[in-house]
Amino acid sequence: MASYKNIQLVVTPKQAAVLSDLKEQVGNNLRVQPSQIDEIQIVKKSIDARKRNEIKINLTLNVYTQGTQSDKIEYPFHYQDVSNKQPVLIIGAGPAGLFAALRLIELGLKPIIIERGKMVSDRKKDIALLNRREGLNTESNYCFGEGGAGTFSDGKLFTRSKKKGDCSRILLNFHQHGAQDTILYEAHPHIGTDKLPIIIKNMRETILNHGGEIHFETKFSELIIEKDSVKGVRTSDGKEWLTENVILATGHSARDVYNTLYRQGVELESKGFAMGVRVEHQQSLIDKIQYHSKDGRGNYLPAATYNLVTQVNGRGVYSFCMCPGGFIVPASTGLGEGVVNGMSSSLRNSKYANSGIVVEIRPEDLLDYKQYGVMAGLKFQEEYERLSYENGEGEKAIAPAQRLKDFVFGKASTDLPATSYLPGIKLSAMHEWMPEFIRERMQEGFKAFDQKMHGFLTNDAIIIGVESRTSSPIRIPRDQESLEHIRIKGLYPCGEGAGYAGGITSSAVDGERCAEMIAAKQIH
């Protein structure tokens, strides 16, 4: 066991970034020569940009001296051969499904994943075609396929949820499968769209090498239910997959799954969600605002982020999935839909910054859709996306757009700036066709955000339509203790699609918890 000192330092961005400078600061703290320091291990790192022109980096460090070295990371995962063990069927290969599968292997059960989309390498090709305006594959796109919607995203791993499970396990698992060291210590860790596909592939290989199964291009059709217990699943090819435990981890964009469950009489319930637009600024402007410097972030600070929230007429208006140094992408999953989302690479080195700016929507806001009952939120989403499709050039994934200040003050834009959105944008008076209760709250929200970030409200920025898939408007209710569906035994609604998570990390935690509940049930 190596001996070390654990210290906390507050340093400048340059001192944090340049090893020789950091060693000097550590040496001063410990009263040793920098040459005596063998290794510095970062435990935690965060940026303090509250004071103008005085950015500080907060560090917690393990420092090794006198010929010692840090211990190798000990991963808590002990996978076994489950080839001949009891099977558990998992529908969906997003973070909830993949982490459920990995946890089942640890616990001695055999995961069998069925995934409607393609494996990540083939999925890349379909996404490339979409970005070149060559058509949408409704089963293989930015939302559907191996790794789920998170695969081609910033890979944000930050979550505010502490009550659902151990997030450190999730971070260590990503790290074991190839993620960079920074996710273990940064305050807001992210992986990046360029790194995630490799990590997802490595997770697939772990599952297969230990006896699990993954079946791509295999689409869920319906549950097999007998006497309020699940007995298996039918897929669109007519095959039956018989099992007494099904983890339903299909994500929040699989509307056909909700429709099937509704038709089969599986209990569903309405929940709040949010919709709005993507806003895009020059990253240099966001850097100047957030770092309180006319020179921006300089050489040693990362692309600046923001997190904005306000209340307008009794509803929250807030930023969602902010992507510094990122780009906007087409996120439709069906024909006739206009949907966008935001992504970043691991370096976050695009010249653009984008974020969803969305308005909270509650079931009581949808009285005009009450004839659809529990499906009202889905119908409203569909209508919002249809408007976006029709006001752009939806068949080519060309999105409607408007200069930000023009939108806020109800003026049609006459031209548009350059954008990161590859398929292209089209001039649209979005304030004219957007649902009124969303438009009015966003207009006031943008004004409030400009009070918090002076210069945010500018006509050099644009809004692009529409951001509509922040979360599911439907929850699949489950028992709080067993995590099974409240009526159907053996069915485990899981992750974002079930309404019990919001992002990669919380979905992964939820997947692990469902796996643990199934394993505990087998023991008893």
Image (tube, helix red, strand yellow):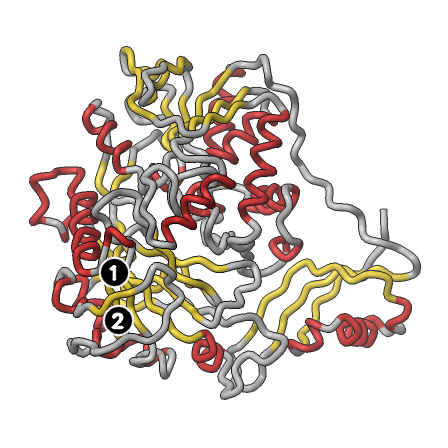
Query: Residue 337 vs residue 192: left or right?
Result: left
Q: Give the vertical position of 1 relative to 189 (above or below).
A: above
Q: Give the vertical position of 5 relative to 218 (above or below).
A: below
Name the element at disc 1.
strand
Q: Amino acid at mark 1?
A: Val
Quarter residue 41 falls in: bottom right
Which mark is drawn over residue 75? none
Which mark is drawn over residue 359? 1
Q: Amino acid at mark 2?
A: Gly
- What is the x, y in percent for residue 411? 16, 78
Regarding residue 407, the answer to whether it shows in the image is yes
Quarter residue 90 falls in: top left
- What is the x, y in percent for residue 211? 60, 21
Q: Give the vertical position of 435 relative to 510 (above or below).
A: below
Q: Residues within 10 Å of mark 2 (few under 14, many from 20)?
A: many
Residue occupying the point 68% across, 76% down: 11
Q: Foreground residue, 424 or 174? A: 424
Q: Residues within 10 Å of mark 1 (few under 14, many from 20)?
A: many
CA gap, disc 1 and disc 2:
9 Å
Say whether disc 1 or disc 2 marks the residue closer to the N-terminus.
Answer: 1
Quarter residue 342 falls in: bottom left
The count of marks equals 2
Residue occupying the point 33% across, 31% down: 478
Question: Which residue position is annotated with label 2?
Answer: 445
Residue occupying the point 50% across, 32% down: 100
Query: Residue 395 vs residue 156: left or right?
Result: left
- What is the x, y in percent for residue 238? 32, 16
Q: Foreground residue, 244 or 203? A: 203
Name the element at disc 2.
helix
Q: Foreground residue, 72 or 149? A: 149
- What is the x, y in percent for residue 157? 51, 52
